[in-house]
Amino acid sequence: MSATRIGHPWPLGASVTRRGVNFSVVAPLATRIELLIFADGEAREPLEVIELDPCHRSGEHWHVEVEGLGLGCCYGYRVFGPIQPGSHGFNPSKVLLDPCARAVTGWEGYQRGAAVGAIPNASACLKGVVTERDRFDFDAAPRPRHPWQKSIIYELHVGGFTRGNGCPVPAERQGTLLGLIDTLPYLQEMGVTAIELLPVMAFDPQDAPNGRFNHWGYSPVSWMAPHPAYLVDSDPLQGRHEVRQLVTACHQAGLEVILDVVYNHTSEGNQQGPTLSWRGFGDALYYHQTAKGDYLDVSGCGNTIAANRPLVRRLILESLRCWSTELGIDGFRFDLGIALTRGEALAPLDAPPLFEEMEADPDLSDLKVVSEPWDCGGLYRLADFPARRVASWNGRFRDDVRRFWKGDDRSTWTLSQRLSGNPDLFNGQPSPVGRTINFLTAHDGFTLADLVSFDRKHNLANGENDRDGDNHNNSWNHGVEGPCSDPGVQTLRDRQLRNLLASLLLAPGVPMLLMGDEVRRSQGGNNNTWCQNNPLGWMHWQPDAGDLDLRRFLRRLIQLRQRLAPLLNQELPSTPSGQVRDAGNLPLWREWHGLELGKPDWASWSHCLAWSLHDASIGPLIWCGMNAYYQPMQFALPPQPAGWRRVIDTAIPGDHDLPATSEPWLPATAPLESRSLMLLVATPLLEDTLVDATSRADTSQAKAAGKKKKAGGGNRTRIISLEG
């Protein structure tokens, strides 16, 4: 028997000491705990059982120091205590995974079904592995720290992005975190600034019905450990090093890494589900329940984590620190994050303690934090997400931009709100930079190519008789359902792809792209590929000429956005009528137009809209016309003495596109083809002109306060050349 000491309650999990390993877990209602030491990950029975009696308890924590153990030690727990109402709660027949384990083993023999019921599962359980807890070397690979104003996010699935015919990743690294390193030149060339990874924390691939496997990973079994299928080395101790290698390579390539994290629920499902980890340590602690012990579910997955409780949110914060300070991750996107703002009985909280503690934690202060503002219980708080630093996924942007280009009635006014920073959602003012993430597509739903090719979902491959997936997609097949060889239909679809991408990249807010949208990746009309670890869920690595045309268009569009970002992301005043009162007192403002200047048509039948940005001294800087009608239209242009440059025209076929340079243009009107978008930029902006918008804004505010500023003061924003 190993020699033991009482140990310490902190740090949580398993940590190496001078004499051995200290183990600490939270189990408030437990009456007895057994620590199980295994010879290796696939051992069917424990090598040693160490019983923790009350002297190993400090408050809610159970702890013990075991001498002679070290890195690589495999372990689990059995926890004894009262059965909760509803016949669930403690189940000492099950070997439990430490919620703080930073590596997980035992996958070869793991059986999800063995964790249900009262039959012992020691031969089919997952086990924790004692690992190091070193901090990431930020001196060698500092965070890129891109400001929100210049950020462009690219959402991808680790396994899916590193597979497929023509994939540039060597066979032995395909489907892995290290394989992503081989794709970084592709991402750099495109111009994105951050990659957002679908869940890479260890998840249960067996959490799927009908004999299928969970591909996306929204079924966590650990909040600390990387998923083993994404690792090259089978040694669980190497997993953390592989994460660090990826993050280091990304940082050195100028890319931030954001993780999609699932803290709103676990893989344990409802009270009839498997006892894998959290449930066995504190069923009533971790999950929202009724007085009878039934689980409350606003995640759609059987349970909801009670993040309002101190011990639960401490575990979540420990996970965030593990990934950000130990592994170097730059930010997190919270799946159904608004569920984490609920209190007891799922009551919405205006000051959720989890996010308050995150904002107060210096270790987490420099991270990008993103969240879905909705959950499956009907809570939807986009503009009023109850946390200052959280950027919300803007589902309204997705829906309203789709509806406009689809040609729906009553879509022009809502589009204008999305293109001016959502003032209808933010009490009449544009949303602050970094508060909304704009997107047209995401992993959950159609790809961009399928959005313009299918009127309805085609999810039969998922084995649920097409019941799964969203039925409300605002998609349009343009006359033919699915793939089509008709050149007229294909030309229109390609134009719509350019319209949608241009609308996304020219709007204020932070744009997010979905993997493969730049090369027309299709999922065959499947809008819920959560179980498709096959070409349906993989990247399109063999683009044809049309695919490459779209990618080239997007790359140029991203370059354009980055150079115009100081203008596009300013909180600009505008009025519904299109004209700004007393515009002469404003440094920079937006005007709305229809076919005539200053006369936007907000009627339900309108399908045309234009907007322009104006500078008090230079005049109009940018003009954008959007024609979603089925016929060509002539738009009046604001006069620009130095001339306009046409930099985007989606009516031009992708294989032609616009030349790198164009001559100044001095027309009174702009002809827009049916269902097309045109962007004009004032010639002075293309000639390294200094735009004193911020300076004049400061001056106006100072005058309003009865102060004076010296000429030339304030911050000056240089709009550099758009050529090349």
Image (cartoon, helix red, strand yellow):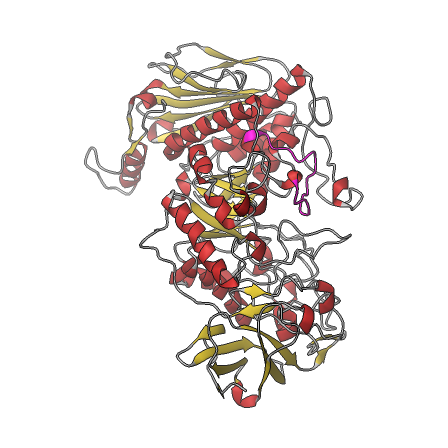
Residue sticking out furthest to the right:
465
Image x and y of residue 198, in percent: 56, 49
Image x and y of residue 90, in percent: 68, 77
Residue sticking out furthest to the top:
667
Considering only vertical position in the picture, is 313 above or below 638?
below
Q: Is residue 604 magenta?
A: no
Image x and y of residue 498, in percent: 54, 25
Image quadrant assignment for residue 640: top left
Is residue 284 something that shows in the picture?
no
Residue 205 lies left or right of residue 132; in this view the side is right
Please tell me which residue is depicted at 55% across the width and 76% down the height of the picture. 26
Q: Is residue 523 magenta?
A: yes
Please tell me which residue is depicted at 48% across the width and 22% down the height of the picture. 624
Is residue 540 something that shows in the picture?
yes
Please tell me which residue is depicted at 50% across the width and 43% down the height of the picture. 436
Considering only vertical position in the picture, is 561 above or below 309?
above
Image quadrant assignment for residue 556: top left
Image x and y of residue 2, in percent: 52, 85
Report the front residue among 422 and 283. Answer: 283
Classify the position of the C terminus by image quarter. top left
Report the front residue among 123 and 697. Answer: 123
Secondary structure predominantly adopted by residues drawn in magenta: loop
Residue 594 lies left or right of residue 281; in this view the side is left
Q: Which residues are magenta?
A: 519-534
Residue 227 lies left or right of residue 328; in this view the side is right
Considering only vertical position in the picture, is 332 above or below 424?
below
Classify the position of the N terminus by image quarter. bottom right
Considering only vertical position in the picture, is 85 above or below 433?
below
